[in-house]
């Protein structure tokens, strides 16, 4: 089935996109920027390696930076001492 064929009665999903080659004597090529519909990210390596892994790495780096800032500032999730510093040098004395 091509784009010229009517899709009536069919469910159609594109699985590839073909583009003209940069050279006149070369055959057509698959469009590297096209991401086909997949049920699992690792089913299409360029999606997993190029897009998802890059986002995962970027989020991980940001998380490490924010965690380092939280530790440096003495931030905790201690609900008993909200708003108080846990650094003994700056903690209020009773």
Image (cartoon, grey):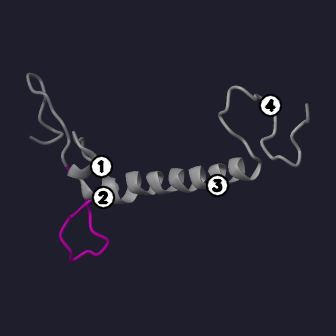
Q: Measure the C-alpha gap from mark 4 to mark 3.
A: 22 Å
Q: Do callouts 4 and 3 mark residues in contact (Cβ within 8 Å)?
A: no
Q: Compare residues 76 and 58 and report the one nearer the observer.
A: 76
In the image, the segment drawn in magenta is 16-31
Q: Earlier in the sequence, mark 1 or mark 4?
A: 1
Q: Which mark is nearer the camera, 1 or 2?
A: 2
Q: Earlier in the sequence, mark 4 or mark 3?
A: 3
**Residue at the disc numbered 2:** 46
Q: Measure the C-alpha gap from mark 1 to mark 4.
A: 48 Å
Q: Which mark is nearer the camera, 4 or 2?
A: 4
Disc 3 packing (10 Å; few <14; some 14–19; many ≥20): few
x and y percentages locating residue 32 in the rendered image: 31, 60
Q: In what quadrant of the picture does the N terminus appear?
A: top left
**Disc assigned to residue 60:** none
**Residue at the disc numbered 3:** 65
**Residue at the disc numbered 4:** 83
Query: Most prominent secondary structure in the magenta stretch?
Result: loop
**Disc assigned to residue 35:** 1
User: Which residue is at 64% across, 55% downward?
Assistant: 65
In-image side of 46 versus 70 (left or right): left
Furthest-front residue in this view:
94
Considering only vertical position in the picture, is 80 above or below 38?
above
């Amino acid at each position: 089935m091509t784009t010229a064929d009517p899709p009536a009665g069919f469910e159609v999903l594109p699985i590839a996109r073909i583009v003209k080659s940069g050279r006149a004597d070369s055959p057509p090529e698959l469009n590297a920027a096209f991401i086909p519909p997949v049920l699992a990210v690792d089913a299409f390596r360029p999606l997993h390696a190029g897009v998802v892994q890059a986002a995962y790495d970027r989020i991980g780096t940001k998380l490490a930076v924010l965690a380092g800032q939280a530790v440096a500032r003495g931030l905790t999730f201690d609900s008993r001492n909200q708003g108080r510093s846990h650094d003994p040098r700056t903690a209020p004395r009773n």
